[in-house]
Amino acid sequence: MQQLQVIQITHDAKQLIILDQTQLPNHENYLTLTTLQQMWDAIKLLQVRGAPAIGVFAGYAMAVLAQYDQHTNYTQFKETFDQQANYLNTARPTAVNLSWALQRMKNYVVEHKEDTRTIKKGLIDEAKRIDAENIAMNQKIAEYGLTLLHEGDGILTHCNAGYLACLGYGTATAPMYLAHESGMHIHVYSDETRPLLQGARLTSYELFKAGIDVTSICDNMASIVMKQGKIQCAMVGCDRIAANGDFANKIGTSGVAILAKYYNIPFYTLAPSSTIDFNTPDGQHIHIEERNEEEIGEMWYKEPMILKDIKKYNPSFDVTDHSLLTAIVTEKGIVYPPFDVNLKKLFNHQ
Ligand code: MRU
């Protein structure tokens, strides 16, 4: 499978290089990041985006920042490291993978009270492990997800949970890639995903480049393609799964889930375990990021399409109630309702 490199570090781990996703699909540009502020901005501005990719990015970001730290004293090194991680964590609140990866890097420092030179090297390896584990998890998600697909299926997806957002096979796209590789014919309908157009700009781009049969539709066309019988299931990614199975994903996802329920179409979310947050009991406790109002009225248009003084509201995610969800596909298997019981069982969570 031919892919652009989304996140990489240089050999000396002094530079973090990312594909600038804000420039896709027309420009494949790379950015070189070396400072904390550049890294924070890259997440905030969605130059790097998608919950699992943000997690992998955060691991590498902390490894790179550590290389610039001059402290030889462990306590001072750790203090700076924690401060930097805490700051990076403020860039995007909804995707739990960010805090998950930062916590893992912080834990590494706590568990390795060694000289700072050794810790710095170890942090590079830890970031690489997060990256490799994520890709392996997506492979397993692909295998489990494939069992839910049939020859000739039409699949609706929302936003972008492909390799640009999750690396490897992606999450929601993972079974699609595997189906395609194994010769199965599928057809994907990709919602445009207003206001940032991740579906139009990124998902259809990714799938098309991979040779997968994909059709781009506007968000308000999901209902008609379902009614016309073109959709046999919906597969989406997610940014945080609460303990009861409620999950946050890109704005518009819950609307797709409600439609799927109405038309009796299976609705799946696919995610690695790093997206499951057992500390959040249900969707009401998930913090939803609100973004700049220009994204609604001005971005992508030659001139503003909503008068300046009109109020705008731009929640970036919504929560899909677990009652609308057919199953959650993870690297450990497919979880069916009751999610509060079965998620804990599969992940051995007390
Ligand atoms: O705001 P973004 O572009 O980072 O949005 C995240 C997403 O791409 C989606 O919500 C996605 O379906 C989950 S992340 C794999």
Image (cartoon, rainbow, N blue to C red):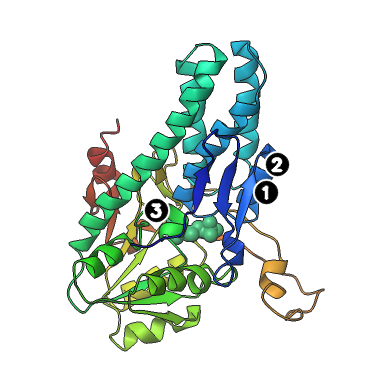
Badge 2 marks a residue whose secondary structure is helix
Q: Residue at x 37, y 57 (%)?
A: 170
At 45% from the left and 66% from the top, the residue drawn is 253
Report the amino acid beneath label 2.
Answer: Gln
Q: Position of residue 252 (x, y in %)?
A: 49, 69
Mark-to-mark CA distance, 3 and 2: 33 Å
Q: What residue type is disc 1 on?
A: Asp
Callout 1: few (<14), some (14-19), or many (20+) C-alpha neighbours within 10 Å?
some
Measured as percent of width and height from the top left, residue 98 is found at 51, 42
Q: In the rendered image of this protein, does residue 283 appear above or below residue 23?
A: above
User: Which is more foreground, mark 3 or mark 2?
Assistant: 2
Label 1–label 3 contact, CB within 8 A: no
Q: CA distance from mark 1 to mark 2?
A: 6 Å
| Residue identifier under label 1 | 41
> Pointers 1 and 2 in contact (CB under 8 A)?
yes
The three-letter code of the residue at mark 3 reads Asp
On residue 67, which mark appears? none
Q: Is residue 334 visible?
A: yes
Q: Which residue is mark 3?
A: 246
Residue positioned most to the front? 11
- Quadrant for the C terminus, please: top left
For the point 63% across and 12% down, the residue is: 72
Residue picked out by circle 2: 37
Q: Is residue 239 above or below residue 149?
A: above
Question: As displayed, is residue 69 above or below residue 211?
Answer: above
Circle 3/circle 2 CB separation < 8 Å: no
